[in-house]
Image (spheres, helix red, strand yellow):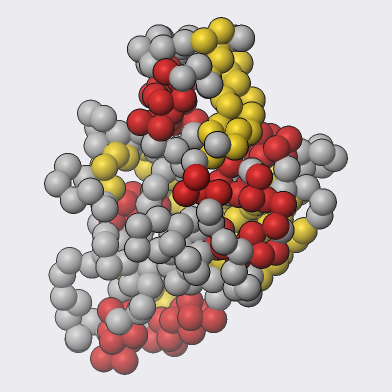
Amino acid sequence: MKQEKLELIIPKTSIGKRADIALHELMSAYSRAKIQEWIKSGFVLLEGKKISSRDIVMGGEKVIVKVQQDEKELQFQPENIPIKIAYEDEDLLVINKDKNMVVHPAAGNWSGTLLNAILFHIPENKALPRCGIVHRLDKDTTGLMVVAKDEITQSSLIRQLQSKKVFREYRAIVWGQVLVNKSIDLPIGRHPSIRTKMAINKNNGKNAVTHYEVLERFMMHSYLRCKLETGRTHQIRVHMSHNTSPIVGDRTYGLKRIIPTKEISLALKEAAINFPRQALHSSSLGLIHPKTKKNMRWDIDLPEDMKNLLDLIRSESSISL
């Protein structure tokens, strides 16, 4: 079993939490059970000492995690899948992810993923935990995401994500007239009965904060800029659904009622209701380069499907902000 070392800092906001819970929040790509297994095996050191899962953290501690890559992870194969590269240097890769692309292999998607494409583009990444992936986008969310090419870069990017130093901005087309700019600060956890979904969970959810700004408002839709302060699974989708302004095309958290045809044209109604994916795009990404320490930022345009939908919405009626 291959081993890689990650060095992290427990955030101050984790004060009073169990060690396994605090670490799972830092390393959400790994299950809590997997982290507990590493702790029990002595692969986690807190301030240089072995710990138990029940130990309480105070925040600010230095933690070293000897990430164990299991045999299944080492068996992932490179595949010649085209990827759009927004930026690349010796240390990191910034990708403009397409729709209909799963980021990491899982049950039902063991091939054809972004990870398989990365291994073809950078074979050396097979030696890294998660093959250098430090954050994810949903299968049908398009746009920017960063991949590390070495252990130092990966550790730095994970630390920047945990300390909220990575700038992530999205564009979203949602149902309804969103009237004011707002921040949504509601914890997100697993849905109580549908395990494939996330939900607002004030008892057991993780802290989740989304800031959004109305860019354009229309008769039955709004075009938003969304900024992530945290990065929970399905965060923007869950928050906007809870805000009664679900993202167009979202089959999981989307529209639960029929839009009257008299409010919008039949063409627009059909285009919006039948939009084949959530209209959500990771448009901007900013970080501190792990090696050069320079502030870096990338911005990309909307993909064609969202551009076309937005043009159709604009052609009907725009309401001044």
- Residue 9 seen by the camera: no
* Number of marks in picture: 0
Question: In this orientation, which residue lies closer to the viewer: 114 or 12?
Answer: 114
Residue 230: image x %, image y %? 48, 39
Question: Vertical placement of 25 versus 130: above or below?
Answer: above
In the image, taking residue 129 as reference, residue 24 lies left or right, namely left
Q: Quadrant of residue 301?
A: bottom right
Residues 198 and 261: in front is: 198
Q: Residue lying farthest right?
A: 292
Q: Quadrant of the C terminus?
A: bottom left
The residue nearer to you, when weighing 164 against 148, is: 148
> Could you tell me which residue is drawn at 20 percent across and 86 percent down?
262
* Percent of width and height locating residue 154: 66, 40
* Position of 13 relative to 219 (above/below): above
Left or right: 113 with respect to 88? left
In-image side of 264 versus 21 (left or right): left
Quarter in which the N terminus is drawn? top right
For the residue pair 10 and 12, the one nearer the viewer reads as: 10
Which residue corresponds to the image point at 57% horizontal and 61% vertical from the top-left? 77
Q: Quadrant of residue 66?
A: top right
